[in-house]
Amino acid sequence: MNLAQALDAALTRRYPPLTVDIKSPATSKRGATARMRAIEKHFTREGDRAGAATKRVAAALGITPRTWQRWKAGTRTPNATILEGAHKRLIGLPRMIRRMSPKGTPPPSSVTVKAIIVWNGYRNRTEQRSTTLGGMRHVMAKVIEAWTARGPERAAKVFQEGAAIVHNTAKIEFEGDEVEVTFPW
C-alpha cells in the first residue's frame, strides 16, 4: 500500500462514509435511475429555472448537459461504475464533510507513519521506519479537504508538502509499498 492508499484507508476508518440508501445495484435500470434522481435532487435549488440542476450535475460529473439528459431519458446508458462512484462522491462525501464540521470529529493533531522515510534526500538506515508527526492539525484539515475534493493522490501530495513545512524541512517523502498511516486518538 503506497502513501495515497494508506491515507485513504486511515481517513476512511476515521470518517466512515455515510451509506446512501439505494439497495438496487447500479447495473440495473432501477438502480441507475434511482442514483440519477438522487444526484439531480442533490443539485436542485429552490427557485431553479428548468435545466439549472442538469447543468450543475453535468459540470460536477465532467459531462455535457445533453449526455446527462440522455442518461435520464434512457436513450444512453451510463457506465455503472461511473454512476456509482459519482453517487458516492457527490452525495456520500458531502454528507461526510458536514459531519466533520467543528461539532464533529476534528482533524487529527498527530499522525503516525510507517514507511521508507526520505528527509531532504537522506534515506534512513532502517528501511521501514515509524515516526509520529505532531502539530499536524491544520495540515490534516487541508489533507481531508483534498481527499474529499480531489482524491487520495492529491491528499498524499498535500500531506507530504504540509509535513515538510510543519517540520521545517525542504522535503519529506514517504515511500514504499508497505506504508501505514494511523491517527492516535
Image (cartoon, helix red, strand yellow):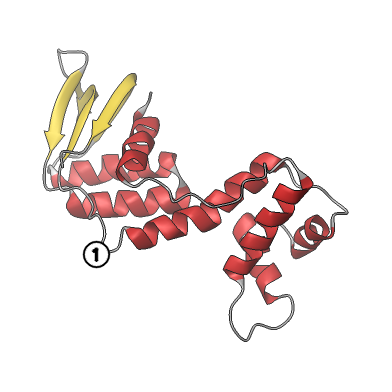
Q: Residue 164 vs residue 32: left or right?
A: left
Q: Quick check: can you spot residue 121?
A: no
Q: Residue at x 78, y 47 (%)?
A: 29
Q: Position of residue 19 (x, y in %)?
A: 48, 49
Q: Residue 127 vs residue 27: left or right?
A: left
Outermost residue to the right: 75
Task: Count how many numbered circles sit on residues in the image.
Answer: 1
Q: Is residue 88 above or below residue 7?
A: below
Q: Residue at x 16, y 24 (%)?
A: 130
Q: Nearer the viewer, residue 164 or 4?
A: 4
Q: Quick check: can you spot residue 162?
A: yes
Q: Residue 138 vs residue 19: left or right?
A: left
Q: Dot 1: within a 10 Å radius of its alpha carbon, few (fewer than 14), some, or many (20 or more) residues?
A: few
Q: Position of residue 59 (x, y in %)?
A: 64, 63
Q: Amino acid at mark 1?
A: Pro
Q: Nearer the viewer, residue 8 or 115?
A: 8
Outermost residue to the bottom: 47
Q: Nearer the viewer, residue 170 or 28?
A: 28
**Image quadrant in which the C terminus is located:** top left
- In the picture, residue 39 is in which quadrant? bottom right
Q: Secondary structure at mark 1?
A: loop
Q: Position of residue 1 (x, y in %)?
A: 38, 23
Q: Residue at x 68, y 69 (%)?
A: 55
Q: Nearer the viewer, residue 10 or 160?
A: 10
Q: Which residue is mark 1?
A: 102
Q: Is residue 135 above or below residue 98?
A: above
